Image (cartoon, rainbow, N blue to C red):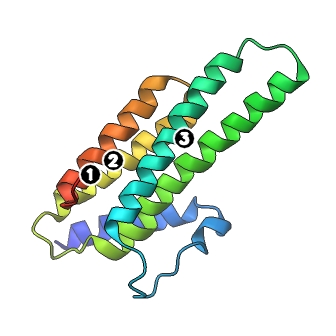
Amino acid sequence: MKRLSIILQLAVFAGAAFTPVAYLAAHCEVPCGIYDDAARFAEMLEDQATIAKAIASIVELSDTHDATGHNQLTRWVATKEAHATNTQHIVAQYFMTQKIKTDDAKVAEKLTAAHAVLVAAMQCKQSADPATADSLKSAIHNFQHVYGGAH
């Protein structure tokens, strides 16, 4: 269990170390009771839908050779990045640091599913392949199922 605790601490540190400061301040980490799990899953699925639309738009605009097309392409890439980062932020800052407890019998399964969402979001950043957005959606649904939330 000590090893798992160390791994969890490293994962949280790594997620925080690579998260822009604006995102770190976006969610309070006090027990306010305002945020809830279902809303976080809904937000991640909304991010995923935006990523899927961004990828489709990037593919569509990839053959443009005018300034307006290049501008829109750049904006869609930035949008895709922002929504993938937000998904990673929710997993790391909300679920991993606040909701997944080390004394939970399913902690390893939950952390594995959470990690899959983090990796899928990273792959969305690295690619304009629509399959990455589909993988992210599957990873979010799997995490939601393992975590115990309804779809």
| 116 up-or-down from 40: above or below | above
Residue at mark 1 to residue at mark 3: CA–CA distance: 19 Å
- Disc 3 marks which amino acid? Thr
**Tag 2's secondary structure?**
helix
Q: Determine which quarter of the picture holds residue 61.
A: top right
**Foreground disc of the pair 1, 3:** 3
User: Are there few (<14), some (14-19), or many (20+) residues within 10 Å of tag 1?
Assistant: many
Task: Tell me the tag on residue 140.
Answer: 2
The x and y percentages for residue 63 are 73, 11
Q: Quadrant of the N terminus?
A: bottom left
**Can residue 61 be seen in the rendering of this structure?**
yes
Q: Say whether marks 1 and 2 touch (CB < 8 Å).
A: yes
Residue occupied by mark 3: 50
Q: Earlier in the sequence, mark 1 or mark 3?
A: 3
Residue at mark 1 to residue at mark 2: CA–CA distance: 5 Å
The x and y percentages for residue 130 are 48, 24
Q: Say whether marks 3 and 2 touch (CB < 8 Å).
A: no
**Tag 3's secondary structure?**
helix
Q: Determine which quarter of the picture holds residue 147.
A: bottom left
Residue depicted at 39% across the width and 31% down the height: 134
Residue occupied by mark 1: 143
87 with respect to 20 (left or right): left
The x and y percentages for residue 138 are 31, 38
**Tag 1's secondary structure?**
helix
Q: Determine which quarter of the picture holds residue 65.
A: top right
User: Are there few (<14), some (14-19), or many (20+) residues within 10 Å of tag 3?
Assistant: some
Q: Say whether marks 1 and 3 touch (CB < 8 Å).
A: no
**Foreground disc of the pair 3, 2:** 3
- Disc 1 marks which amino acid? Phe
User: Are there few (<14), some (14-19), or many (20+) residues within 10 Å of tag 2?
Assistant: many
- Disc 2 marks which amino acid? Ile
Residue depicted at 18% across the width and 61% down the height: 148
